[in-house]
């Protein structure tokens, strides 16, 4: 496929709409949980475990095998299959009379989402020329982040006016629109680099080890006590076995050869670390604002919107800067902006006025918007098109692992049963996010420093 032209707008719109629904549904449910608890007769802890954590866990476990499926079966086919599974889960959730059925629906939605996101990234990797990838991934990454950030606002409005089932029903027309756009293009687009090698098989052992390590680690963090003494070694042991196994299997779930590419490893790590802070803030601030200011769900959603606006407005800036200043300098700029925003949260949260908090969230969102595209472009820049699905799958796995880690931190710190005020516990979380950004800044020297245009000219020998 010719990669010197911009991709057709319908392709970008199709993959953007389909992929945006996944993070949107991971956070949209947050404000609907109280209503769902009343309707389904379930407590908040049970709802969070089965409808939020399980959604993220299934997503993170299936991202890498979904990427490999895209390389084997074709990216367009895999993308369409993911949309069908996701839509089926949404319809089941609308018709579900019991918690168990809604939980099953969320698992199906997560399975479909796991097929959609890495395949969408791989499609962009294959149809966008390298000099335009930072800008394309900036738009795409900011859309994913903005979808997650705006989820509570949309979920609050839909739940308040139409009931909690509306948050699932709204997916159906958007999926249909994406399908129409996909089918309007040439049937062969996006399937370059496809392979049907006999060795291309799925690593079910790796999937089981990754799932065990993540699930036991999350449960151990939330339960603590004697349970953690058993589960923590099991989690650590699962990850050690996963590393040992992946170096010996012919078609690994997480290819060690890709992780040995330093730009890929560092770019993916930065994506995961920023996702940790973003998801944690989205689930932490509603509790803090509700208890400290007594804001309602819709008002809280509007406060969080400042982070979304920052991400959307500054995503193009990230692509622009990467083309002119280079990937490393751009990512450092974005991380610094996010760090300033987080430091602002330390001093503005719990104040008498919301404006300092809104400004701090805006800085944090702007930094995320600047960083997302260049970090993803840097991670995938040295991946061959035949492995773009696998690379995007691993990158998405790192993204979701960051989200799970962030939500786990929030649930552990804020669930403290002592008399410590929620503002003090929130400050602990803010300092963790600051430390995460310091780590991200510390690893930027390993990223490419040249401008994208220079890299392209060097590779072409001009």
Image (tube, grey):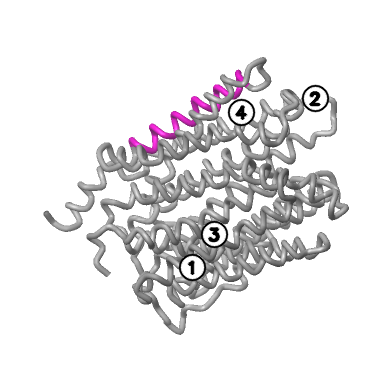
Q: Earlier in the sequence, mark 1 or mark 4?
A: 1
Determine the residue positioned at 45% across, 34% down.
367
User: Is residue 60 or residue 26 the one in the foreground?
Assistant: 26
Please provide percent x and percent y for residue 285: 66, 33
Q: Which residues are magenta?
A: 329-348
Observer able to see residue 220: yes
Which disc is residue 179 wearing?
A: 1
**46 left or right of 188?**
right
Residue sitting nearer the eye, 135 or 167: 167
List the residue tagged with mark 3. 174
The local secondary structure at tag 2 comes to loop
Cα separation, mark 1 vs mark 4, equals 43 Å
Q: Nearer the viewer, mark 2 or mark 3?
A: 3
Q: In screen coordinates, is 243 left or right of 320?
A: right
**Viewer-side label of 2, 1:** 1
Q: In which quadrant of the rendered image does the C terminus lie? A: bottom left
Is there a contact, CB below 8 Å, between mark 4 and mark 3?
no
Query: Which SS class for mark 1?
Result: helix
The quadrant in which residue 329 appears is top left
> Among all residues in the image, which is located at the extreme left?
462
Name the residue beneath numbered marker 2: 420
**What residue sits right under mark 4 in the picture?**
431
Q: Secondary structure at mark 4?
A: helix
Q: Quadrant of residue 168?
A: bottom right
Q: Residue furthest right?
A: 41
* Cα–Cα span, label 2 and label 1: 50 Å
User: Nearer the N terminus, badge 2 or badge 1?
Assistant: 1
Residue name at image x 76 percent, y 52 percent: 49
Whether residue 347 is in magenta: the answer is: yes
Q: Is residue 236 visible?
A: no
- Determine whether 230 is above or below 345 in the image: below
The answer to which of 371 and 433 lies nearer the viewer is 371
């Amino acid at each position: 496929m010719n990669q010197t032209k911009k991709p057709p707008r319908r392709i970008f719109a199709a993959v953007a709409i389909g992929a945006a629904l996944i993070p949107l549904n991971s956070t949209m449910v947050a404000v609907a949980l109280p209503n769902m608890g009343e309707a389904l007769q379930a407590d908040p802890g049970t709802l969070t475990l089965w409808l939020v954590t399980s959604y993220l866990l299934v997503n993170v476990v299936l991202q890498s095998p979904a990427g490999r499926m895209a390389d084997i079966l074709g990216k367009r086919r895999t993308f369409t299959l993911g949309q069908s599974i996701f839509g089926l889960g949404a319809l089941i959730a609308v018709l579900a009379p019991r918690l168990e059925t809604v939980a099953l629906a969320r698992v199906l939605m997560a399975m479909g989402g796991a097929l959609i996101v890495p395949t969408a990234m791989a499609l962009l990797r294959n149809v966008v020329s390298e000099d335009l990838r930072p800008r394309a991934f900036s738009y795409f990454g900011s859309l994913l982040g903005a979808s997650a950030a705006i989820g509570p606002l949309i979920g609050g409005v839909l739940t308040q006016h139409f009931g909690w089932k509306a948050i699932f029903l709204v997916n159906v027309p958007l999926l249909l629109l994406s399908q129409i756009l996909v089918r309007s293009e040439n049937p062969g687009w996006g399937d370059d680099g496809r392979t049907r090698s006999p060795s291309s098989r799925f690593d079910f052992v790796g999937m089981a080890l990754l799932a065990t390590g993540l699930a036991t680690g999350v449960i151990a963090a939330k339960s603590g006590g004697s349970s953690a003494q058993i589960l923590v070694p099991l989690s650590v042991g699962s990850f050690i076995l996963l590393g040992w196994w992946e170096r010996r299997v012919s078609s690994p779930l997480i290819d060690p050869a890709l992780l040995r590419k330093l730009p890929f490893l560092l770019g993916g790590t930065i994506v995961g670390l920023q996702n940790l802070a973003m998801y944690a803030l989205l689930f932490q601030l509603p509790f803090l604002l509700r208890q400290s200011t007594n804001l309602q769900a819709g008002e809280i959603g509007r406060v969080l919107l400042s982070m979304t606006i920052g991400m959307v407005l500054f995503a193009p800036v990230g692509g622009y800067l990467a083309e002119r200043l280079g990937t490393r300098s751009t990512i450092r700029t974005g991380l610094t902006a996010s760090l300033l925003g987080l430091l602002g949260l330390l001093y503005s949260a719990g104040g008498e006025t919301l404006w300092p908090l809104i400004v701090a969230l805006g800085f944090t969102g702007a930094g995320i918007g600047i960083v997302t595209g260049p970090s993803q472009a840097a991670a995938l820049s040295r991946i061959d098109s035949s492995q773009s699905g696998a690379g995007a799958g691993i990158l998405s796995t790192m993204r979701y692992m960051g989200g799970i880690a962030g939500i786990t931190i929030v649930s552990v710190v804020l669930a403290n049963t002592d008399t410590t005020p929620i503002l003090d516990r929130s400050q602990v979380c803010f300092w963790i996010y600051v430390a995460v950004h310091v780590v991200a800044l510390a690893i930027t020297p390993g990223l490419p420093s040249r401008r994208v245009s220079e890299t392209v000219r060097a590779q072409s020998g001009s």
